[in-house]
Amino acid sequence: MELHTQIKKYRTSLNLSQEELAEKVYVTRQTISNWENNKSYPDIHSLLLLSSTFNISLDQLIKGDVKIMKEEINKSDLKQFNRDGAIFTVLLILSMVSVVPLTVFLGFYGLIIACLIWGISMFYALRIEKFKKKNDIQTYKEIISFTEGKRLDEIEKAYEYGKRPYQKLLLALASGLIAFIICMFFIWIFKSYIF
């Protein structure tokens, strides 16, 4: 956090000692020292008094901290997105690969297990879609950029936004083709082994 350097910078620019600043914001000199050495963080009341004493806005006083806090939030969001994406991928592959063996060897109960795996993978798919909507990332380039911790500039964003309808159409066609192939595969298996 940069607040400790901000406090020290503004205090020295006003030629105030730690003790003088402590008197103005109604805390002890030790508290000011702790703030400047990043050992503790001022409460909201103290932040307001500091911004008033330094004659700056609260935003100016904590602006470096806000940037760092946003970066930390983005990092935790990114970790969550990547983790959910990995879980979804593994579960989706598992559900596609395990349907036939589970159904053949366990019958109806195997089908229930396969449906459960598929249901859990869809839960993670919904979480990913919510996250993508919240962060306005839809196209492949936007998703890759986000997973690398970057953001597209306005021109790139507009270009990617223009590609979204076409990508959704292609996604729908690809999904339909995959579903058709899977259905044909199941029909072939049932005709070959059951009938």
Image (tube, rainbow, N blue to C red):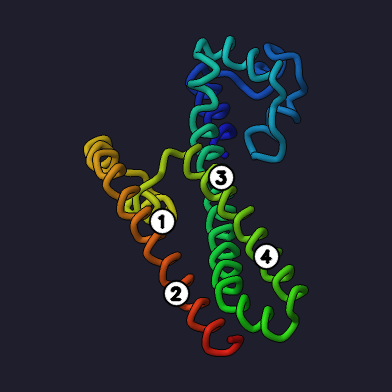
Give the foreground label among 2 and 1.
2
| Helix, strand or loop at mark 1 | loop
Residue holding disc 2 = 184
Q: Is residue 147 above or below residue 183?
A: above
Residue holding disc 1 = 148
- Tell me the distance, in whole angstroms, between the alpha carbons under discs 1 and 3: 14 Å
Residue at 69% across, 32% down: 41
Give the foreground label among 4 and 3.
4
Looking at the rendered structure, which numbered label has been put on residue 89?
A: none
- Left or right of 168 on screen, residue 19: right
Residue holding disc 4 = 115
Q: Mark 3 packing: few (<14 Cα in 10 Å), some, or many (20+)?
A: few
Which residue is nearer to you in this view: 99 or 187? 187
Percent across and percent down for residue 187 are: 50, 77
Give the foreground label among 2 and 3.
2
Give the foreground label among 1 and 3.
1
